[in-house]
Image (tube, rainbow, N blue to C red):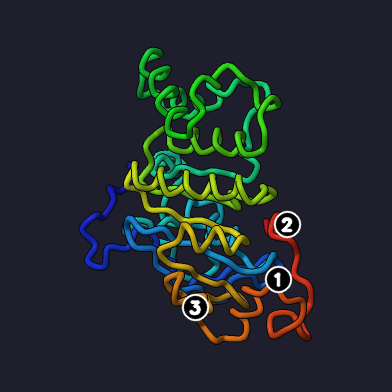
Amino acid sequence: MVPAPATDTPDGAAIRWIDVHKAFGEKKVLAGVDLEVARGDSMVIIGGSGTGKSVLLKHVIGLLRPDRGRVEVDGVDVASLGSTELTGFRRRFGMAFQEGALFDSMTVAENIAFPLRRSGRLTQAETHARVEECLEMVHLEGAGSKRPGELSGGMRRRVGFARAVALEPAILLFDEPTSGLDPVMTGTIDELIIELREKLGSTTLTITHDMASAFRIADQIAMLCDGRILVTAPPDEFRNLQDPRVQQFLRGEARGPLTDDTESAPHETGESP
């Protein structure tokens, strides 16, 4: 049985990393991460490629377990859950992957219905109605019969969002939601993330390299550097921080304290056991 959410936690934290360490072989990725996401907030985590942003996210949904430290979601220690408990626990989350990660063999409607059918909560008629509702939320009414290959990149992302919110999750996770999109579509996706969060009342955790997007959607921005959280601040405060590592990242400079005399880190997609 999955522990019930501890909604009365005194600090109101939905997600908490406590002194989290993680290494893959000789490569130390996380070296004592301490970070909290307040319930109902939108947290954006930034940092260079290979710094461990995706690793942080994988700990939240139990795909990885820390070598040391704890990851808590609504007061529940994720690492304490068994495989059966994790299945139920993950229903608290809506996950939107890079590029949408849709099933090419399914229609848009079938993709969105997939988590609904797996949950077994709804009848066929209720599932159809919920799919239509989700399509409306992402402004894709009438697109249910199309296949992913017929859609633009931005439309595929929106279908991915619709699938992510199908079960009305308490926590929404976005992994590079605007990667590869033009500025206009990026703005559209950002507005949609804000809309979905407000409509569902969800806590939102986003990983991105896009600082313009981060400033639009975040209540708090956290920067991961050298395996730890360098700083956490609201957007207006973050852009004015004088730490040279923050300023180098914001300006996109090739040389500076983040890159000088350091070795290249592996790309995050390779950070797996």
Residue 148, given in percent of the width and then of the height, sits at 66, 27
Q: Quadrant of the N terminus?
A: top left
Q: Is residue 241 above or below residue 46?
A: below
Question: How many angstroms separate mark 3 from mark 1 (CA)?
Answer: 23 Å
Judging by the rendered image, the residue that carries numbered circle 2 is 270
**Is there a contact, CB below 8 Å, between mark 2 and mark 3?**
no
Judging by the rendered image, the residue that carries numbered circle 3 is 231
Q: Nearer the viewer, residue 58 or 111?
A: 111
The amino acid on which the numbered mark 2 sits, given as a three-letter code, is Gly
Q: Viewed as shown, does residue 203 lie left or right of 110? A: left
Q: Nearer the viewer, mark 1 or mark 2?
A: 2
User: What secondary structure is marked by label 3?
Assistant: strand
Residue 173, given in percent of the width and then of the height, sits at 49, 50
Q: Which mark is residue 243?
A: none
Q: Is residue 189 above or below residue 254?
A: above
Q: Quadrant of the C terminus?
A: bottom right
**Crowd tier of the residue under label 2, counting other residues whose Cα lies within 10 Å: few below 14, some 14–19, many 20 or above:** few
Q: Is residue 72 above or below residue 241?
A: above
User: What secondary structure is marked by label 1?
Assistant: strand
What residue do we see at 48% from left, 34% from top?
138
The amino acid on which the numbered mark 3 sits, given as a three-letter code, is Val
What residue do we see at 32% from left, 63% from top?
13
What residue do we see at 67% from left, 48% from top?
182
User: What secondary structure is marked by label 2?
Assistant: helix
Q: Viewed as shown, does residue 232 lie left or right of 245? A: left
Q: Nearer the viewer, mark 3 or mark 1?
A: 3
Residue 252, given in percent of the width and then of the height, sits at 69, 72
Q: Which mark is residue 27?
A: 1
